């Protein structure tokens, strides 16, 4: 196991590659930043769903064989006193799985898409890899055509003679920036507009407003304390409507006065 992951068990749908050393000394993979609930809020989904993506599940339907599924995204073991388990790469992967879901593809077919990307494209951590952009659509398109897999074919289209991802997926992928082979920055998909960014080396991976650079935690703390939104917006240089949109998206039960 990589040196930086001693004492931490890396969970990934394709962990054989990860265990081979690609995550060594890379805190994007090995540093726990978010709880499942926190990551779910940032991606815009229910925590129980993200938990199954991160840690897998086992179900025992009455009178039927047990159903077991491994994780879809990178996660680390939770330990006593620290409920965090999602590193930055896991957050990025969750965002891309969410994009795949938006096409209407069932989860079992999304799992198959990941297998194809790994087996056919020889990707490691395909959902957070630069290769997903350069080769992913072609790999999935060619596989779907050769195997007559109409469901996986929904993930890609041909545009101007090129094999590209479905528009919904492309919009999500445009939110990811890369450094070397792996994702290094994510514009959070919880809002339609590009309002929040996450950079793992800044503020411990906490979300920052794109405009003004204010930490979301600081903005929300002042909002919860009852400060006028206009005052918060002025102090941080964040447009008022952007604060409102973010609060409504991540904490929908709260209202901006």
Image (cartoon, rainbow, N blue to C red):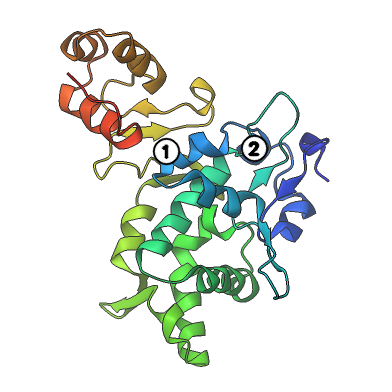
For the residues marked 1 and 2, what is the alpha-carbon distance in whole angstroms?
Answer: 15 Å
Residue at 43%, 38% in the rendered image: 41
Quadrant (top left/top right/bottom left/bottom right) for the C terminus: top left
Nearer the observer, 23 or 95: 95
* Element at label 2: loop
Percent x, y of residue 47: 50, 44
Task: Determine the residue located farthest toward the front in the rendered image.
Answer: 62
Question: Closer to the N terminus: mark 1 or mark 2?
Answer: 1
Q: Is residue 101 left or right of residue 71?
A: left
Q: Residues within 10 Å of mark 2 (few under 14, many from 20)?
A: many
Q: Residue at x 66, y 56 (%)?
A: 56
Q: Which residue: 31% across, 56% down?
A: 171
Q: Which mark is residue 217?
A: none
- Above or below residue 112? Residue 233 is above
Residue 103 is at least partly visible in this image: yes
- The residue at which mark 1 appears reads as 42
Residue ID at (54%, 27%): 201
Question: In terms of depth relative to the viewer, which is nearer, 233 or 105?
Answer: 105
Relative to 131, is 84 above or below? above
The answer to which image quadrant residue 210 occupies is: top left
Q: Secondary structure at mark 1?
A: helix
In the shown orientation, is residue 210 left or right of residue 151? left
Residue 139: percent from left, percent from top: 50, 76
List x then y, in percent, for residue 215. Answer: 39, 20
| Residue position marked by numbered label 2 in the rendering | 85
Q: x and y percent of residue 73 in the render? A: 59, 53
């Amino acid at each position: 196991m990589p040196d930086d992951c001693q004492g931490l068990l890396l969970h990934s749908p394709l962990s054989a590659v990860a265990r081979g050393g690609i995550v060594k000394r890379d805190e994007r993979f090995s540093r726990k930043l978010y709880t499942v609930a926190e990551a779910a809020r940032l991606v815009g989904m229910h925590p129980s769903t993200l938990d199954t993506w991160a840690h897998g599940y086992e179900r025992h339907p009455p009178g039927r064989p047990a159903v077991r599924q491994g994780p879809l995204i990178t996660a680390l073991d939770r330990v006593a006193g620290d409920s965090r388990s999602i590193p930055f790469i896991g957050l990025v992967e969750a965002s891309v799985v969410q994009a795949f879901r938006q096409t209407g593809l069932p989860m079992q077919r999304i799992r198959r898409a990941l297998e194809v990307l790994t087996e056919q494209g020889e990707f490691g951590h395909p959902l957070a890899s630069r290769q997903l952009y350069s080769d992913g659509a072609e790999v999935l398109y060619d596989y779907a055509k050769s195997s007559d897999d109409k469901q996986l074919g929904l993930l890609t289209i041909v545009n101007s003679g090129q094999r590209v991802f479905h528009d919904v997926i492309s919009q999500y992928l445009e939110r990811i920036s890369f450094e070397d082979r792996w994702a290094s920055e994510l514009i959070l998909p919880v809002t339609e507009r590009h309002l929040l960014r996450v950079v793992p080396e800044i503020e411990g991976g906490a979300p920052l407003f794109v405009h003004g650079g204010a930490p979301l935690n600081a903005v929300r703390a002042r909002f919860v304390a009852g400060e006028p939104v206009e005052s918060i917006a002025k102090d941080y240089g964040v447009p008022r409507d952007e604060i409102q949109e973010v609060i409504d998206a991540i904490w929908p039960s709260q209202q901006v006065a």
